[in-house]
Amino acid sequence: MWTTKNRTSTRVGRIGLATGVLITTTLVGCGKSEDEGVPDAGCIPSGSAMSIAVGARANSPVPAVPLLVEQLARSAARAGKGVSIIQIDGRIDVDLPEQFFTSKAGNPNKYDKDLDKWIRGLHDWIGNMRADEPEADVLKALDVAGAHAKAGGTVVLMDSGLQTRPPLDFSEDGLLEADPATVVDYLRKIDSLPDLHERNVLMVGLGDTAPPQAELDIASRRNLIAIWTEIAKAAGASCIELREMSPGVATPGEMPPVRLVPVPVATFPSKALCTEWVLRDRGALGFHRDSAAFRDPAAARNALASLADELKSAPGARVELIGTTSSAGTERGRQLLSEDRAAAVARILVELGVPAGRITSRGVGANWPNRVPDRGPNNELLPGPAARNRSVVVRVTCP
């Protein structure tokens, strides 16, 4: 059974996982109900061991066990498989070592009542979890949860996914908009991918925030989900499922602090004329990887409409578009890509009625004055700085 909330957490590291004392009682009782599987679980199998990583921390909603997670836990209990709980904060806890359901019931009704009580204990435990340390290390939590779930088991991640510990610190400007494949390449090169081989992964509530953390816009949430999905794939997960979390309330006060993650804002200045600003490769103005094709052409057109209107209202104004890139690829490739992306913005402005003669476009590749260093000590491409360097500079001049 679940122990009391005056518990002692087991601290763990990436190597040499501490398992604590396992409660290894097994299922008994002739009245055991049969497991009929778990509906709506996608590729997640029923009856597998579970390790649940929970972000009960600042800037995130109070965790609550979703119905699907409850159903999977019931299935694990019926199959005699254990359920463990990992706490996500700045120094990962095995908040509760592996727990096994046991019942001496002699009939199905009593067995089901015992199981219901066991499940209520799971709800209570997770609902009362609170972080012990500042910040959040989701990568390590996944690694630890994978070790506890073992091959064939299921790892459940219940967290916003906004990690604030290196090497994936989303409080770093640009990382939230980084290309998912670039993030995975970086983590692989520095040997920081979690080990999820032969594990099933269920991620719940990615992108859900609570004040003072700003709410993620649609584009930021989508990219965050894409980053964690690519990480799970690269980490060897045999099955990946994503689910939304039911709306929760803000985490109570007096929690260890977690740095805020800046949310990109893809808007133009209130007056776009006679000034210069940078359109970062994100949101409505984001491009497909290594391409000058917009991820969402209609959204890009809508985003550029206000600039086009201002240019049309000032006949003497001219606009120069300057494409820039990260240091990825060859110099020739960077030059061509930067030229093509600037030209793609120019084409939309022309389609919106700005005379082509008032628009110029060019590319400078990775050679521009305001670029930030995007290579690490071993020449690895840094995802956050690389994202910041992918842009189209808009320079409007007036007579």
Image (cartoon, rainbow, N blue to C red):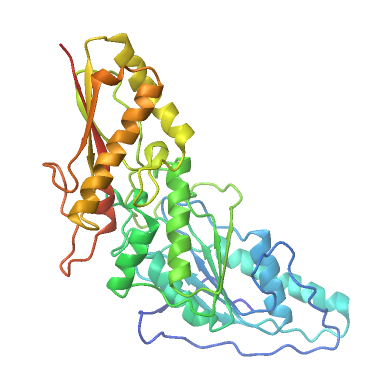
Residue 259 visible in the snapshot: yes
**Residue furthest toward the left?**
369
Q: In this view, does 316 lie above or below 129?
A: above
Q: In this view, does 296 lie to the left or right of 391?
A: right
* Foreground of the two, 310 or 263: 310
Q: Is residue 339 left or right of residue 221?
A: left
Q: Is residue 339 above or below residue 27?
A: above
Q: In terms of image quadrants, where is residue 91?
A: bottom left
Q: Is residue 184 above or below residue 103?
A: above
Q: What count of labels does the image hold? A: 0
Q: In which quarter of the image is the C terminus?
A: top left
Kindly identify the residue that appears in the image at 34 percent across and 54 percent down: 258
Q: Is residue 173 left or right of residue 104?
A: left
Q: In this view, does 138 lie to the left or right of 173?
A: right
Q: Quadrant of the N terminus?
A: bottom right
Kindly identify the residue that appears in the image at 36 percent across and 48 percent down: 291
Q: In this view, does 371 lie above or below 195?
A: above
Q: In terms of image quadrants, where is residue 203?
A: bottom right
Residue 135 visible in the snapshot: no
Q: Residue 48, image x and y in percent? A: 64, 79
Kindly identify the residue that appears in the image at 79 percent across and 87 percent down: 104
Q: Residue 207, image x and y in percent? A: 47, 50
Q: Residue 83, image x and y in percent? A: 60, 77
Kindly identify the residue that appears in the image at 85 percent across and 88 percent down: 30
* Foreground of the two, 134 or 383: 383
